[in-house]
Amino acid sequence: MNTQAPIKVNAATKERIRYVAALTNTSQADVVDRAVMEYAARHAEEIDEGMQRARAALASGDAAVAAYLLDEPLEDVQRVAGSQSQS
């Protein structure tokens, strides 16, 4: 799939991307693609941990999902929701 969509970066980052692309005779999109691939490879363990947390929240019901997405303790979400159930 080769669709393009704009991404928002600050002006300094945009300039670095532009310079790197010019100096390496490649496109700005290729610079960003490579940077994301390298980041994912370097941070694979952190990404895996995040996926494990997300899976645990999904398996624990609606309140746990809300707590995960809101970055709030499950007990607080359950209290506000008026329910102590897991879903």
Image (cartoon, rainbow, N blue to C red):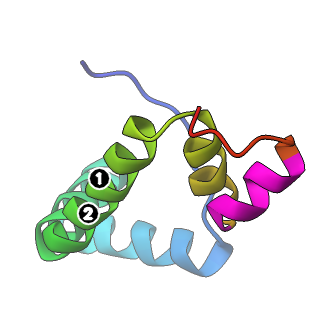
Mark 2 in CB contact with mark 1 (< 8 angstroms):
yes
The residue at which mark 2 appears reads as: 47
Q: Amino acid at mark 2?
A: Ile
28 vs 3, nearest the viewer: 3
The kind of secondary structure element at disc 1 is helix
Does the magenta run of residues contain 75?
yes
Does the magenta run of residues contain 65?
no
Name the side, left or right, on which 23 lies relative to 14: left
Q: Main secondary structure of the magenta part?
A: helix
Residue at x 44%, y 41% (from the top left corner):
60
4 vs 24, nearest the viewer: 4
9 vs 70, nearest the viewer: 70
In which quadrant of the rendered view does residue 20 lie?
bottom left
Residue numbers of the magenta segment:
73-80
Which label is found at residue 51?
A: 1
Name the side, left or right, on which 66 lies relative to 50: right
